[in-house]
Each structure stands twice: as structure tokens, then as C-alpha cells.
Image: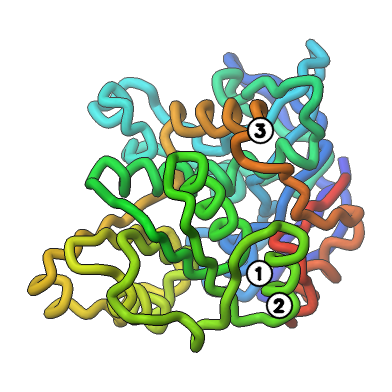
Amino acid sequence: MKALVYTAPEELVFRDAPDPVAIEGERLLTIDSVGICGSDMHAFAGHDERRPAPLILGHEVSGVVEDSGKRVTVNPLVTCGVCKYCRMGRDNLCQARQIISMPPREGGFSERLAMPERNLIAIPDAMSFEQAALAEPIACGWHAVRLGREKGAEGPALVIGGGAIGVGGALALMAQGIKDVTLVEPQAARRAYLETICGFKAVDPGDVSPDGAFGIVIDAVGFEATRAAASAHVAPGGVIVHIGLGSAEGGLDIRRMTLQEITFIGTYTYTAQDFRDTVAAMGDGRLGGLDWTETRPLSEGASAFADIRAGRASAPKILLKP
């Protein structure tokens, strides 16, 4: 099969790769669409030691099960199913978890993929493969908002970052009952796209005011500066939900968080139930038109990565098509 292979920092090669082999309990999938995630960008830049080259990246996948013809989206998080976290329904914390695009599992920037059958979620006939590939990034936001709501978070809401994770978080906020949502995005072209195409209220980071005004803040970026902004903008008694993995240190105003009883929640991916709930919400229209993507051939994946890196991509998500 053909695949887009990460071979070295800032180097992607479209080349032949071994066909996947399905073991017991797995099915082979012909891939239709696969999204470029921020974690793929970190790996591409050489900043993710968990994803060493050579490796096939990509974990936002939709396609067709080869032996049944079933149209599916893929939950890329493979868990053991028997540990205490899996039994609690918090399978995203499984200590034996694996995710495609990270060894030992190759990712979805390829023509075919082997996945456990339980990770293949059927999609409605009316849902396109392009829409279905958005289930994974939106599920991250769905999980984050659910955790924040369980801690009593109320609106108005601020989402820091206008990429797919931030957009998914904004859509999940509205679907879960918080309608007053502001998106923060520094790139002017993307800000315009979010407003005109997606209908969001999108602002430059310098135009967020006043401080302490938001009952829930989602940091979908995860750098020192965005954590500092989240600390400043969250209301007393409010909730910061942290999804982004941009950097590991700095930014939180621990003194203010203590004095104002601000809750901070770290959130990783989603549970299997969150993923299923996300697909259901996508199917019944609660997450909007899901039309904020751009598609390109997988063979042109290297140029797509370069455009994202250079800030030339306005759409929150670029999908690659094998």
C-alpha cells in the first residue's frame, strides 16, 4: 500500500509501506479520509519523543470495513478492557492504552489500517467520510466539556485556539447547553473563516475582555501564554479545562486559582462512551454542519503539513484522501 511516512524531523515521504495484518478481533479498513492533528504537527517538527521516525502518523480516520462494507469512523484509542480504569468507564486512562500513530501501532496516513472491531463506529448513510473523520477531534472537546459540566461549569465560555480541537470544544459547549461561546484565534485568516464559514464569535487574543468573565475556559493549545490567559480570564469559582499539549510548563496563576477557588482539569482524549456520544450528536445535527474542512490528496500531504506550519491554512482541519 501507499503511505505518507514521517522519516525525520520536517520530512514526510509518500512511499510504499507494508500492508497491515489483522490479528484476532481486528478488521481491515480501507481509509477514505484522515485528518492532520496538532500532535501530528508536533511529531513532524521533531518535538514528540513518543513518535519516533520512521512512523506513519495520523489518527483521525474514516473509511470502509473491507469484509463487510460497513462505513465507519475510527476510535484510535486501543485499551485493554479489563483494568480498573476500563471497568470504571474511564478507559482513556488505561495504563496499557495504545493509540494509532504511536508505536507499536502505525497510523492512518495510508491506504489501509487494521483496528480492533470494537473501535470501529458505524456512521449514518447521510454522514460523509469527511465529516466522520472529525469525530476524533470533536470527541476530545465533548469529553472536556462533559468533565467541566460535571464540576458545575456554566457560561459564558471562552475557547482558546481556533483549530479543530478548539472548534470541537466550542461545538460541544453549545451542544451541552452553554450557548455564549467566544473563540480566541490569533491568525486573522482563520479568525475570518471561523466567523464567516462557521458562524462563531472569534476574537484576537488581545481583544478578550474583561478578565475574570468566563465561567469555563477551554485551553485547546496548551502553551505557557495560553495557560496564563486561561488563568486571567476564568471567573471566580470557574473551571479551566486543559486539552492542549503545546508545552509542559508555566503559565498557571496558582495564587489566583487558590484564592478564587478555580478548578483546573487536565483532560486526555475521550472515553469510548464519549466517542460514541459524539458520533450520535454529529449524526443528529447537534454539532452543526461539520463543513469546516479542506481536503487534499494523501500524496500531497507534505505540502499540507508545510502550509499548516507556515500559517497558510485557514480551515481548522485539513483532511488527506488516500
Residue 163 in sight: yes
Please tell me whether mark 2 or mark 1 is closer to you in this view: 2
Spatial CA span between label 2 and label 3: 32 Å
Asked if residue 237 is positioned above or below residue 130 in the image, the reply reads: below
User: In the rendered image, which residue does mark 1 sit on?
Assistant: 44
Residue at image point 19% right, 68% down: 236
| The label number, if any, that marks residue 204 in the structure image | none
Q: Residues within 10 Å of mark 2 (few under 14, many from 20)?
A: some
Determine which of the numbered discs, if any, sits on residue 285 in the image. 3
Query: N-terminal of the two: label 2 or label 1?
Result: 1
Q: Amino acid at mark 2?
A: Arg
Identify the residue at horizontal 69%, vertical 65% (top origin). 194
Q: Is residue 49 visible?
A: no
Check disc 1: other Cα within 10 Å, few if <14, some if 14-19, many if 20+.
many
Question: Label 1's element?
Answer: helix
Q: CA distance from mark 3 to mark 1?
A: 34 Å
> Which of the two residues, 281 or 236, is positioned nearer the viewer here?
236
Mark 3: few/some/many CA within 10 Å (<14, 14-19, 20+): few
Q: Quadrant of residue 310?
A: bottom right
In x, y percent, where is residue 120?
63, 24
Q: Earlier in the sequence, mark 3 or mark 1?
A: 1
Q: Looking at the rendering, which quadrant does residue 65 occupy?
A: top right
Q: Secondary structure at mark 2?
A: helix
- What's the CA distance linking mark 2 and mark 1? 10 Å
**Amino acid type indicated by mark 3:** Gly
In this view, the residue in front, 140 or 32, is 140
Q: Amino acid at mark 1?
A: Phe
Q: Which residue is mark 2?
A: 309
